[in-house]
Image (cartoon, rainbow, N blue to C red):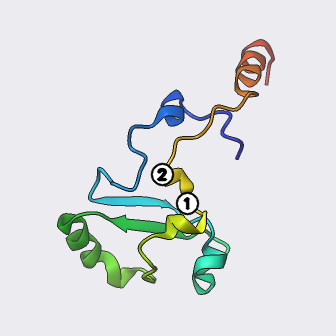
Amino acid sequence: MKDIILRPSCYDCKFKGRERHSDITLADFWGITKIAPDMFDDKGTSLILISSSKGQKIFNSIQKKCRVKLIKKDIFSEGYNTALLQSAAIPKERNIFFSNSRAKKF
């Protein structure tokens, strides 16, 4: 949860932002207990962003098999799910971790 072992591209991701590059975006729904507490089940809740008519068509075809709740469009202003908007910062411990992982046995 400290972003130490992310792929290098995660620190400079070209796909972050409000404008999505896909028809559908799936993500962990951080802050579900505050935004839609009735959807919290302690097993994980997914956030689905639909960005095109093709994505909407696909979602419509599976929607009846899912437990769905529509939420306000701009969930980012709540301070949750910000990973959809910005790349992770490179933690100062990253280099130490990888140096140790090569030098020490597991």
Q: Is residue 41 visible?
A: no
Residue 87 in picture, x, y percent from top left = 52, 41
Q: How many other residues sit within 10 Å of disc 2, few (<14), some (14-19) or many (≥20)?
A: some
- Looking at the rendering, which quadrant does residue 77 occupy? bottom right
Q: Amino acid at mark 1?
A: Asn
Residue 64 in picture, x, y percent from top left = 34, 85
Identified at 50% across, 69% down, the residue is: 75
Task: Kindly identify which numbered label has been placed on residue 81.
Answer: 1
Q: Disc 1 vs disc 2: Cβ atoms closer than 8 Å?
A: yes
Identified at 66% across, 39% down, the residue is: 3
Task: Kindly identify which numbered label has been placed on residue 57.
Answer: none
Q: CA distance from mark 1 to mark 2?
A: 8 Å
Pick the front one: 74 or 46: 74
Task: Kindly identify which numbered label has been placed on residue 85.
Answer: 2
Identified at 45% across, 37% down, the residue is: 13
Q: In the figure, 62 relative to 5: above or below?
A: below
Pick the front one: 78 or 28: 78
**Furthest-front residue in this view:** 77
The quadrant of the picture occupied by the C terminus is: top right
- Looking at the rendering, which quadrant does residue 60 occupy? bottom left
Residue 6 in picture, x, y percent from top left = 59, 35
Along the horizontal axis of the image, is 27 left or right of 52? right
Q: How many other residues sit within 10 Å of disc 1, few (<14), some (14-19) or many (≥20)?
A: some
Identified at 29% across, 50% down, the residue is: 21
Along the horizontal axis of the image, is 59 left or right of 93? left
Q: Is residue 104 visible?
A: yes
Q: Amino acid at mark 2?
A: Leu
Label 2 SS: loop
